[in-house]
Image: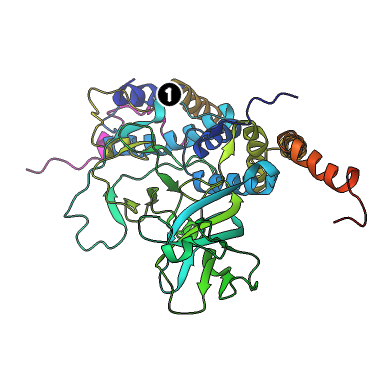
Amino acid sequence: MRRDDIIDRLSTIAGGGLMTDETSPSQEFFLRNLHSMREVAIREEFRRDNVINESNYQSFFPVFDNNVNAGCDGMYKFECPRVLRVNSVMSGFGYVGSESGNSPFLMYPSPDAFYNAQRHRVTRSKDQVSAYYDPSEGFIYANSPVKRFFVRMIAERPEDIYTFNVHLDDYPISMKAIEIMEEFIRNGSLGYILRIPGNKVSNSQSDKFLPQNNE
Amino acid sequence: MITSGRYKTIPFDEILASTKMMLGIEQTNDNDGFLKILINEGLMHLDNLDKYGVFASQFEIKDNRVCLPNGLSQVLGFSFTDKDGCYLDAYASNENGDGRPEILKGPVGSQLFSQYNVVTNNGGMIVFDYCDLPSNYIRLMWKGRNVDSFGLTVAREEEERGVRAYACWKFSERFPERYGRDLRSGWQREWKLQKRYLRADAVQNSYYQNREKIQALWGAYVVFKNFGVS
């Protein structure tokens, strides 16, 4: 299901989204709330199923960029959009590793976890590519200048990933997560986020208060 | 008892993969580092006879020191060699004159060759106490754990189940909110039972392998020993 279809479906649920006057929420309002609802729904889906649905993932290939890495010493950085953290055990990163898909990097959930792991003899090995993601700067840091690698992740904003075409591709969310969103809207947990309450005010009701056109 | 997994070793990542499947975290590699540490720890603590072997390899002497290999438990001996690994002439003919290379061995500080020390700093090293070494290379024979090129303990196929249970148990202690108490205690029990089985199995196999030697020793000591006649 594409993004606009999802927004239409969710905003009109439970009698919402019916506009009888000119007021209409902006597209940014819908997008912002869709992203935050998606985050809640994916976490809830994982809590129920104990497995992340494959539809939530997106893939792309970070490439080594000399301009980004100018002045880097020891750690090499690759641009990466913000990742959605699923729970305490799993981050939103699925596979991060070689393009063949056979040799994953040793990923660490935070910079601090990486620095701590470098103190242990087992995880200190330079033969194994180790990496971490720093959300404050939006980079994956690796301890090896890899030319190109493969990332499969759940992004906070799916539009940030360059392989995603909003108009052609299905939005990276499972049908089950959409149903969870609907459920939350119906029972009121997330009703205030995306559903637009129906506006039954007549279009001409307040016309007398409008300033006259003084051109 | 016939055990099929004894003579086949498996890569380290194989246990890692099955542990992640068991824990239900195969969709991420966030915790691979922690699991690797746990698996290596479990393999070390199996501590049975099968994990040990006798090895020999050439090492370079730098600054009068030789870094010891990973997993070493006992230095059996060493001999000075040239760069290509051939034994030095001066050391190839000992006082017996049989042309065999002389192996310097014995406990540290023995009469035979007392001018070196084995210290455990920084992964362990041999320190020579004098400067005019005959060569910059030695061939070292040691007894130790069977390790791979990364210094991690090599696992055998039949050890996978026990070590996986150990890693699952320790990992679930780290994240108790995700894994219940019954799961944790189940994995702990599986690890204990598997460790017991593997140790017993290793002892049994060791007896089968060295049965003739043990019989000969007992025969020499008990059966044919004549007191008063040396």
The answer to whether A108 is drawn above or below residue B22 in the figure is: below
Question: What is the chief secondary structure element of the magenta stretch?
Answer: loop
Q: Position of residue A118 (x, y in %)?
A: 46, 59
Query: From the image, which quarter does the N terminus of chain B lie in?
Result: top right
* Callout 1: chain: A
Which residue is rendered at x = 40% and y = 70% of the image? B62
Visible residue check, residue B98: yes
Q: Where in the figure is residue A47, as x and y percent of width and height?
A: 57, 33
Quadrant the C terminus of chain B occupies: bottom right
Q: Residue furthest right?
A: B227
**Magenta stretch holds residue A67:** no
A129 vs B117, nearest the viewer: B117
Q: Nearer the viewer, residue A128 or A169?
A: A128
Q: Nearer the viewer, residue A16 or B145?
A: B145
Q: Which residue is mark 1?
A: A174
Residue B181 seen from this side: no
Image: B209 above or below A202: below
The amino acid type of the residue labelled 1 equals: Ser
**Residue B194, image x and y in percent?**
73, 35
Q: Residues within 10 Å of mark 1 (few under 14, many from 20)?
A: many
Q: Residue at x 34, y 51 (%)?
A: A142
Numbered range of the magenta stretch: A189-215
Q: Is residue A203 magenta?
A: yes
Identified at 60% across, 60% down, the residue is: B75
Classify mark 1: helix, strand or loop: loop
Q: Position of residue A65 (x, y in %)?
A: 19, 49
